Image (cartoon, rainbow, N blue to C red):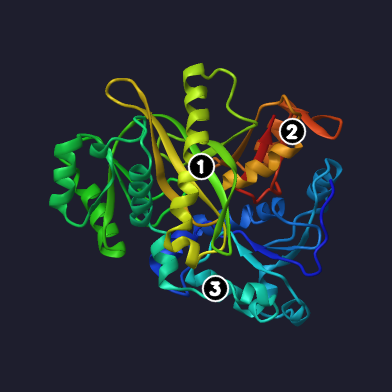
Amino acid sequence: MTESTTVFPNVFLFNPSCDFAIANGSRNWQPNKTLQKMEADLAVLPMFFAKRSDFVLVDELPDNCFLKALRQLGFVIPQFILKKELSENRLFIDEQKNRLFPWGWSPAAHKFLTPLKQSCSPDFQNSPVYQWSTEHKNISSRRFALKILNNIINSMSVDWSIENSQLPIICSTRSDIEKAIADWGNLILKAPWSSSGRGLQPITKTPIHLKVWEKINSVISEQGFIMAEPLLNKVHDMAFLFELKNGCTRFLGVSHFFTNNKGQYGGNWLNGLPENQSPELTDFIQKCIEVLTQPLINAIDNSPIAKHYEGVFGIDTLIYRNKNNELRINPCLEINVRHTMGMISLRLEKWLGADKKGVYKTFYQPGTSFATFKKMMGQKHPVKISDGKFQSGFLALTPSNESAQFGAYLLV
């Protein structure tokens, strides 16, 4: 693997709970214990974006055995530094740096990374993400994604985009939600700020149970409103991945992902879709990529995101069948103004054999450690490498010490 050398290192932080931190708004916000454990167990993941000279902030230094295995397979290993050293390691704090790259920005992430800001490059200090702003909160919400969705639909003259009658709506009261149920029947309610399929509430039974109303009212009181969408006959999840710099959006590629029955992120397909897909779907996906990429870029470049954000982001889309069994797409289901697991999957594809299909997944099975899972999978799927590329096998992408409850892995 070759890499370009930069004079100063970047610093990466894995904080995927950033959307909840944005919703809360407090600089002192902390994720719950389960999310804290997830962030700690998966803390090394930004290493797949990093160069050898960069730093990744972690709760615990990864063991040499884990790093050695990745190094032998050709992965570039950055430097790791403990999060607790942000307040006491003067040498690291004062060392000149290029940029700070949390998974996503929030008031809490800004507070946590403040000690490192003064030693960053002028380029970063002059960027729109150097300080937190209320505009950043606005562009991270599902309400903003709805504006972009309307913009895209109005700019395109195609008959395979989502129908106007199926567009998400903003609900602030119980009667708003009851009207949506009357119009659509089954629907899904989404917290304005949430991620990876959390903050979702499907409504498939009426009358709505009292406990469910309590959850809905809690979101509305905490976040101001809730988004409602019809429960569509989903066929495929796809994300368009971009990078924004100096107000200009660059297309990075697409990621094909899948979710569990609760709508929570499950993993990404690597090197395209599995081979058992219908030609109708693969042709439709290709058409969507060819036709939608530029309208998405235009919509972002002419929106507040271009002014108030710099970095990578993803736009999730949803391919579904309408009542006539025709394939349709919602071209902007949500905008993830942060890193995404899809971006990691895009990086991992470089290590796969050209004709090999794979999957990048996260692991969490209460009662089973990632170490136990890794041992079982490693025996079942031994790694085979040829010409420096993965041909088949299981590879743990995060440390698998006995205390690790969460993990991430590659299966080819």
Q: Residues within 10 Å of mark 1 (few under 14, many from 20)?
A: some
Q: In the rendered structure, which amino acid carries the disc numbered 3?
A: His
| Residue located beneath label 1 in the image | 293
Give x and y (percent) for residue 44: 68, 55
Looking at the image, residue 307 lies above or below residue 333? below
Q: CA distance from mark 2 to mark 1?
A: 25 Å
Between discs 3 and 2, the one toward the N terminus? 3
Which percent across, then down, holds residue 138? 38, 64
Give the label on residue 179, or none: none
Q: Is residue 131 above or below residue 146?
A: below
Q: CA distance from mark 3 to mark 1?
A: 31 Å
Q: Residue at x 36, y 57 (%)?
A: 144
Spot occupied by residue 367 in the image (x, y as percentages of width and height):
55, 42
Q: Are marks 3 and 2 in contact (CB under 8 Å)?
A: no
Disc 3 + disc 1, Cβ < 8 Å: no
> If the image is split into quadrants, where does the N terminus sit?
top right
Dot 3, crowdedness within 10 Å: few (<14), some or many (≥20)? Answer: some
Lower position in the chain sequence, tag 2 or tag 1? 1
Which residue carries the number 2 mark? Answer: 352
Q: Split into 4 quadrants, where in the image is the C terminus? A: top right
Q: Residue, x 60% and y 78% (percent of image)? A: 114
Distance from Cα at disc 3 to Cα at disc 2: 36 Å
